[in-house]
Amino acid sequence: MKYNRILVRYGEISTKGRNRKMFTSKLRENILAALRDMPTISINASRDRLHILLGEEDGQEVLSRLQSIFGIQSYSPVVKVEKNIENICMAAYNLVNKLYEEGKTFKISTRRADKTFPHQTNDINYQVGSYVLRNIEGLKVDVKNPDINVNIEIRKEGVYLSCENFEGAKGMPAGTSGKAMLMLSGGIDSPVAGYLTMKRGVEIEAVHFHSPPFTSDRAKQKVIDLAQTLTKYSGKVKLHIVPFTKIQQTIHDQVPENYTMTSTRRMMLRISDIIRSKNEGLAIVTGESLGQVASQTLESMLAINDVTNTPILRPLISMDKLEIIDISQKINTHEISILPYEDCCTIFTPPAPKTRPKKEKVQYYESFVDFQTLIEQAVDETETIVLNVASTVASNDEFDDLL
């Protein structure tokens, strides 16, 4: 039997009150965006669930794409039939027969939401189960731990049957929690931070610092590929590539060696904050994990954060490296991140960076240089591209046409 719809169950959305409609509407919008190349798809959303009507589309492809859409707790391919026991029995048989292999067990689980339906729940279970048993040789019943659990839901508009359940990405629908700038390097951590932030419904724009000729075009492409991978979870990522060579060379020449890392991070944060303001973002996201490297101690964070009052989100703050790597592999960024193309954070790393920098000292060292002019120039020369889930890249000049 061919499935004719997919039932989507909400996660945290179900806990929302009067504004639940806004969250369900955004989830519907995100699903349609992910399936926009499937013209016969339609969606019916209600207070407690959402139905994707497949039309003539490939149900397996739709199931695959739903895996990366935040806001979905779980989803199941479903058959809808008319409200009579004969149709229910036949549909249940077809579903079980499709999945049955020798030795497998099954169970019928009925929920009668429409109490006007003439058959009681236990009667439906018995009639449907008996029909399936009679027609599939070797099949056995297991009411406690079945291999195949046929869920039957009797509702006013019809009867829904399903026996497969897929885990969703959970979280909140992308775009329901405002916008933030992700400081995206070429490493393992920052793409994972972006993913976890998007999972909480935050729209991400990425900021990358590029220092040619010290960093190559392949290093730049590596970051574009990482941002492109993240579009699978958000539909679109706007990537700002900041020319950072002059600032980095100035820091290297003017700031004492053990403070160059601290100053570099401060300049990156100042630039990210300006780009955030220009693009109406509400926060900045980093891939920092407490104590992982010299710039990620509490003392370093205090000295670096001094340049902005904007909230800094650090979703990896308590994770160890192995936990971060596990997530990077899950979201398919790990193999890109480990490509041997260095970013600007690694090429100028001093041999002994200060792990407990003093805010007053780095302010003093920076006071001898007009960094504000260099920062304004870098922002003015920033290249902006837009990546979407269909792998289309647009330049900054084309961006307005995409809105």
Image: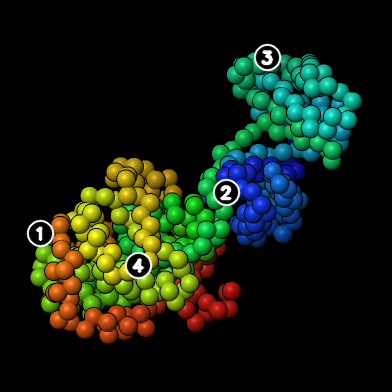
Q: Earlier in the sequence, mark 3 or mark 2?
A: 2
Q: Which residue is mark 2?
A: 71
Can you say whether 194 is above or below 79 in the image?
A: below
Residue 286: image location, x then y, percent: 34, 59
Q: Which residue is mark 3?
A: 140
Query: Disc 1 to disc 2, how far (Cα)?
Result: 44 Å
Residue 352 - label:
1
Residue 242: image location, x then y, percent: 34, 75
Q: Residues within 10 Å of mark 2 (few under 14, many from 20)?
A: many
Q: Amino acid at mark 4?
A: Asn
Q: Residues within 10 Å of mark 3 (few under 14, many from 20)?
A: some
Colouring method of the image: rainbow
Query: Disc 3 to disc 2, how far (Cα)?
Result: 37 Å
Tell us which disc is closer to us: 1 or 3. Answer: 1
Q: Amino acid at mark 1?
A: Ala
Q: Nearer the viewer, residue 121 or 229?
A: 121
Q: Which residue is mark 4?
A: 309
Query: Disc 4 to disc 1, how far (Cα)?
Result: 29 Å
Tell us which disc is closer to us: 4 or 1. Answer: 4
Count the numbered circles shown: 4
Secondary element under disc 4, as helix, strand or loop, is loop
Q: Amino acid at mark 3?
A: Lys
Q: Quadrant of residue 129?
A: top right
CB under 8 Å between discs 4 and 1? no
Tell us which disc is closer to us: 4 or 3. Answer: 4
Residue 92 - label:
none
Q: Earlier in the sequence, mark 1 or mark 2?
A: 2
Give the left or right position of residue 342, taking residue 237 as reference. Answer: left
Q: Nearer the viewer, residue 79 or 306?
A: 306
